[in-house]
Structures are given as C-alpha cells and as structure tokens.
Image (cartoon, rainbow, N blue to C red):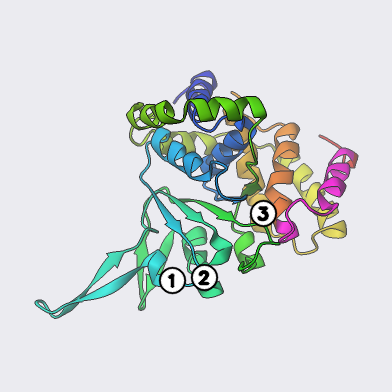
Amino acid sequence: MLKPVEINNKLSDVVHAIHDIVRDKKDQIELALAAFLSGGHVLIEDTPGTGKTSLAQAFGHHLNLDWKRLQCTNDTMPSDIIGVNVFDPQSGNFTFRQGPLFTELMLVDELNRAPSKSQSALLEAMAEGQASIDGRRYALPTPFLLIATQNPAEQIGVSPLPESQLDRFAVSFTLGLPSTQTEAKIIADADSRFTTEVNSTPVLPERGFLELCDQRKNVICDAKIVTYLQDIATAVRGALLPHLSVRALIQIKGLAQAHALINGRDYVAPEDIQLMVPSALRHRFGQNLGKTDAMDKLQDMLTSIAVP
C-alpha cells in the first residue's frame, strides 16, 4: 500500500500537469480530481471557449483513461449517446454498436441543449454504470466518469436539467476566463501548447487511477465527522434544500476523503467537509447556479455549526 506522502506526490503531479494545460484553474482541477477519485461526475456551467474540452482531454491523458466527447444539440437522440442495434443481413442478427457513452471519461458538451429524453439517457449510466437498450443491459467501463457542461440558463434554446439528474453530479463549478496575464501567455503559446499536450507522457500508469481510487476508500472518516455532516444536512434541509438527498451526503463524504488524500492525509478533517459542501450543493439550488443568495446563506450556515 502506498504511503500518504507517495499518494500526495502522485496526485500533485497530476494537478500540476493539468494546470500546465488549463492555467489559472488549480482550484477547479483539484475539485474535479476529488470528484473523480470518489467516483463522482462533474457539472460545469460556462460559455464556449473557456477550456472545458482541454480540461477533459488533460484529465483523460494524465489519468491514463480513454475519453470521448459528445456535442449536444436540440435534436440529439438517446441513440446518439448510448448506441444502436444494427441489423446484419448476412447473419440475420442485430449487433449492438456502442455510442460514445462506452468510455472511461466522457465529456458531454452543452447537455442542457439536448431534449429531455436524451438527457435522461444518462441517468442510468451515472447512477449504475450501465446502459439499457431494447431490453438489454450493457455494463460500462470501470471507471465511468462524466464531465457535463451546460449553458447559462438565460441563453436561448436550453432545457433545464431535472433535479434527478442534477443530484447525480458530485460537484459543479465554473471555469471562467483566465487573468489578463495568463490569457496573454495562452495566446502566445497556443501552437506549442498543442504539441506539448499530444506528446507528453501520462502522469499515471495504466490502471494507476483505479489504485488511487482504492486508496481513497481507505481514508478514515470518523463517526464524529459523519455526525458533523449530518448536522450540516439538517441545517440545509431546514433553510435551503428540504429534499437534500442521502446520495448527496454520500458524495460529500467521498469528496472529503479524496480531498484529504490529495492533501497527503489518511483521515478526513472538518475542513475537508467545509470545503467540499459548497461545490457539492451549488447545482442542487437549481438552474441559476450561484446567482441567488443561497450560497452566501450556506457559507454563513457552515460557520455557525459546531465543529468536532
């Protein structure tokens, strides 16, 4: 078993390698990494051209995972995501042709532009790691991780994601624009950055990511920490989210374990919970991500709850 310092070194190398590609976004990179280590999915609300595809590609490369991308439109069909049964006239049988869903890391761009029926095609995959078509179930690769992006709610042609789907995302965040100084460097290095990304060696060896996921499960989460998380949930349910799910609390526990692991610890501290809760609940407040006072109320709530 790897020691905490060895795990910390590996994960730090991953963060630094991805930060070389998606600059100025270290906090978001660490948050996405925590989600992936806990088996969770990531939701990003942003406009085009802010580095979402680069982020997915960088994670796929340096975690040594196969990755695919799907661009959603208003006529995206469930079969465009899952795949389709194709009739073979020679054999007289149907053969299942896999869609982009069958990968280890999937980027679904502009998910809220897709029709509701197509959005729901991802629900089973996100929750159970499998897909169903014509009455048959097909297992997805392990791991199966999803990065979905959505356009801001005020843009034309978007279909709000249902609560059942939002609840399956472990975290959400925005990337936004880089600083002026970083933007200038990105523009200047644009051509050489592409060559460097393609030719660089993955940080993790094959199956190395799964080993780190197993290490995350071994991070100690004391009963007092679980009670602290429940105290937060009780307060949130009373004032902000009456239907905050148990799934969300399980996700927060996993995120906190992963955050501890990234920071070289084999136990969860209260600050791990405090840091993960806002990003885990942000998208659960609805379509207006970060545009209400809910996040401010949540932060005030976190400071008022007794820490173990």
Q: How many marks?
A: 3
Q: What residue is drawn where x is 79% and y is 53%?
A: 291
In the rendered image, which quarter contains the C terminus? top right
User: Can residue 19 be seen from the camera position used here?
Assistant: no
On whether residue 285 falls in the magenta region, the answer is: yes
Q: Which mark is residue 248?
A: 3
| Viewer can see residue 1 | yes
- Classify mark 1: helix, strand or loop: helix
Region rendered in magenta: 284-303
Q: Position of residue 81 (x, y in %)?
A: 41, 64
| Tag shown at residue 74 | 2
Task: Assess whether residue 195 is covered by the magenta stretch.
Answer: no
Instruction: Kindly state the secondary structure of the residue where label 3 is placed.
Output: helix
Residue 287 place in picture, x, y as percent: 71, 61
Q: Is residue 37 left or right of 65 when viewed as pictured?
A: right
**Residue position marked by numbered label 1 in the rendering:** 78
